[in-house]
Amino acid sequence: MRASLHRMNPSVKFVIVMICMLSLAFFFDPWTPLVFWFSIMVMQIFLSNISWKNWSLLMLPFVIAAFGYLWTTLLFAESGTGTVLWSIGSVDITESQLNHALSLSFRVLAFSSLSLLFALTTDPIIFIRSLMQQLKLSPKIAYGIMVGYQFLPLLKDEFIQVQQVQKLRGLSDDSNVFKRLIGLRRVLIPMLSGAVRKAERVAFAMEARGFTGEPRKVFYHEVPIEKKDFILAFLFICVLLISCISSLWLP
């Protein structure tokens, strides 16, 4: 129960997340995204094992962006109708301006928290396999994405190795920021040539093993859709419906 979202079928989770985002895009009141954001936080607490430290670090830029939307909308948006709540110098903050600013800010928080929930509870490799099996993604595209994802740690290690080799040969100059940026060119060129060689070898290997793009019906690693996936999907839909009707009974 604690890690139910981690074990949820990735394709079902992806479809539900997209439905929630598209539905929230049609609501412009502040209560709907706020209730949805709070509900997502509750689900994250009880149905996942996400590290709150990592989540806070990833969420921080979105919180800053939400505050920026709030501040700029209050100051630079056109004066709307409604009661003037307070004045900042010559700027009058009306009730409609405040509602609009809060709606934009809470929408940023709701969308970002839902995206992080999906990203932090979904294994990328299982997600690609699920896209092939449930959403009929072409194996050529799917395995290409999977191989590209596996290249990321290799490129990171190669970047560090090239930097260390250049330092040993006295080619690295870190005296100022400008010279560091110029020095990146000497690192990126060998990395680019190495990446091209790796991609060519992988393409030959995939073609030799039959990854030519034909649709498949049998998979070695199956990602099934189980009863718990429908229960969690129904829970997401309930959260969405409660959030959408909250504007009717909240002030």
Image (tube, rainbow, N blue to C red):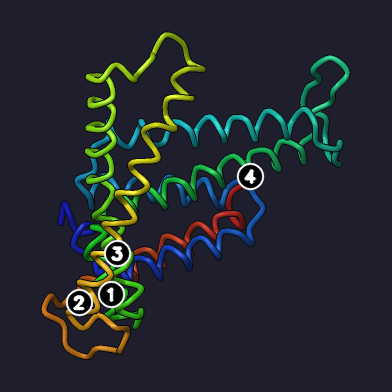
Mark 2 residue element: helix
Q: Residue at x 32, y 37 (%)?
A: 55
Q: CA distance from mark 2 to mark 4?
A: 35 Å
Q: Residue 227 got which mark?
A: 2
Q: Residue 103 got which mark?
A: 4
In this rendering, is residue 215 above or below 192? below
Q: Position of residue 21 (x, y in %)?
A: 51, 60
**Nearest to N terminus: mark 2 or mark 3:** 3
| Residue on which disc 1 sits | 230
Q: Residue at x 48, y 32 (%)?
A: 61
CB under 8 Å between callouts 2 and 3? no
- Mark 1 or mark 3, whichever is nearer to me: 3
User: 10 Å neighbourhood of mark 2: few (<14), some, or many (≥20)?
Assistant: few
Q: Residue at x 33, y 47 (%)?
A: 42
Three-letter amino acid code at disc 1? Phe
| Residue on which disc 3 sits | 200
- Mark 3 or mark 4, whichever is nearer to me: 3
Three-letter amino acid code at disc 3? Glu
**Nearest to N terminus: mark 1 or mark 3:** 3
Mark 1 residue element: helix
CB under 8 Å between callouts 2 and 1? yes
